Amino acid sequence: MKTVSGEPGASGETNPRTGRAWPLSRWLLLVLIVLAAHLALIFIFGARKPITPMAVKNAPRLELAAGAGEWLMLNDPTLFALPNINGFSAAWLKPPPLHFHQQEWTEPPRWLQLPGGELGAIFNQFMETNHFATLKFELKPPPGFTVPLVPLGPKFAEISTLRVEGDLARRPLLTSLKLPSWPYADVIAPSKVQVLVNAAGEVVSAVLLPSANSGEVRNADADRRALELARAARFAPASDLTIGKLIFDWCTVAPPATNAPVGLE
């Protein structure tokens, strides 16, 4: 009588001695042992002698009769059409030798006749049949009357203005700068400030440029005010740093009179 345990086996069968099912590893070990024994029996009892072919005895053979070679030549369709040593024409037995002549690929030079009297005849004929326009050279051309151009400079500015030059001119100025007028009896030179603007539009560097002309009249207060306005300027955002110049053209006004005129008594 078979008993069923709580542990199911790989094949579902139980061992009659222990009453348990065999695990899968035991079944695989049993299959390997049987396979190894099968292979060992094949190597032990298998034949190892090499296979040798059997010699052929009493096989039928086909041989041509003696002197039948000439009859077989009759099967050649070109026997009487082409020269053959066994043909019926005696002229074909001794064909004439062929002489090879090497082809001359170069020929001796053949110089062209060039008479000396005809040298330049074609050029002379060309010159005779063609007429060229003549050029008249005037050694003393007539004088041309010109009117001198007098550059008209801009009139004196009534208010102070700001100019933006360089790559910075492409970025709009967002800050409204109030430029003062300076009390001075003469015209003062513009203040030039070189600025470096970051991507956010802020001025990160402002440097006052020196005057290019030593004779210009500079105002220290105006230059100082130009630096302050340049640092406070804000421009439109961009993708990278931008460098440019801020040129302040100052307007001057007459200074107030400090001394009253002396009257005559």
Image (tube, helix red, strand yellow):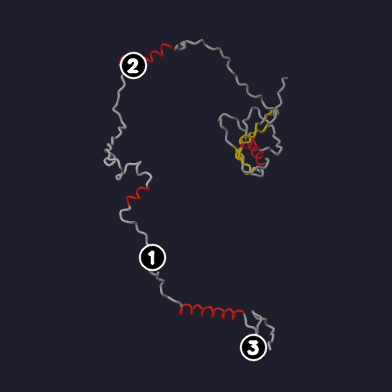
Q: Residue at x 64, y 39 (%)?
A: 227
Quick one: SS at disc 2? loop
Residue 21, percent across and down?
65, 83
Residue 73, percent across and down?
34, 49
Amino acid of disc 2: Leu
What residue did someone put label 2 on? 119
The image shows residue 39, relative to residue 186, as above or below, that is below
Kindly report which numbered mark, 1 or 3, lies closer to the viewer in this rendering: 1
Amino acid of disc 1: Ala
Within the image, what quadrant is residue 1 found in? bottom right
Residue 263, percent across and down?
72, 21
Kindly report which numbered mark, 1 or 2, lies closer to the viewer in this rendering: 1
Task: Point out the tag, 1 or 3, that comes first from the N-terminus.
Answer: 3
Q: Residue at x 33, y 16 (%)?
A: 119
Q: Along the horizontal axis of the image, is 216 left or right of 181?
A: left
Seen from the viewer's position, the closer of residues 163 and 95 is: 95
Within the image, what quadrant is residue 257 found in? top right
The image shows residue 261, relative to residue 167, as above or below, that is above
Q: Along the horizontal axis of the image, is 163 left or right of 112?
A: right
Residue 252, percent across and down?
67, 29
Q: Residue at x 34, y 50 (%)?
A: 71
Q: Which mark is residue 16?
A: 3
Task: Point out the tag, 1 or 2, that comes first from the N-terminus.
Answer: 1
Q: Residue at x 60, y 19 (%)?
A: 150
Q: State yes or no: discs 1 and 3 in contact (Cβ < 8 Å).
A: no
Q: What is the spatial separation of the Cα atoms under label 1 and label 3, in whole angstroms? A: 69 Å
Q: Would you call the spot at circle 3 few (<14 residues within 10 Å), some (14-19), or many (20 or more)?
A: few
Quick one: SS at disc 3? loop
What residue did someone put label 1 on? 59
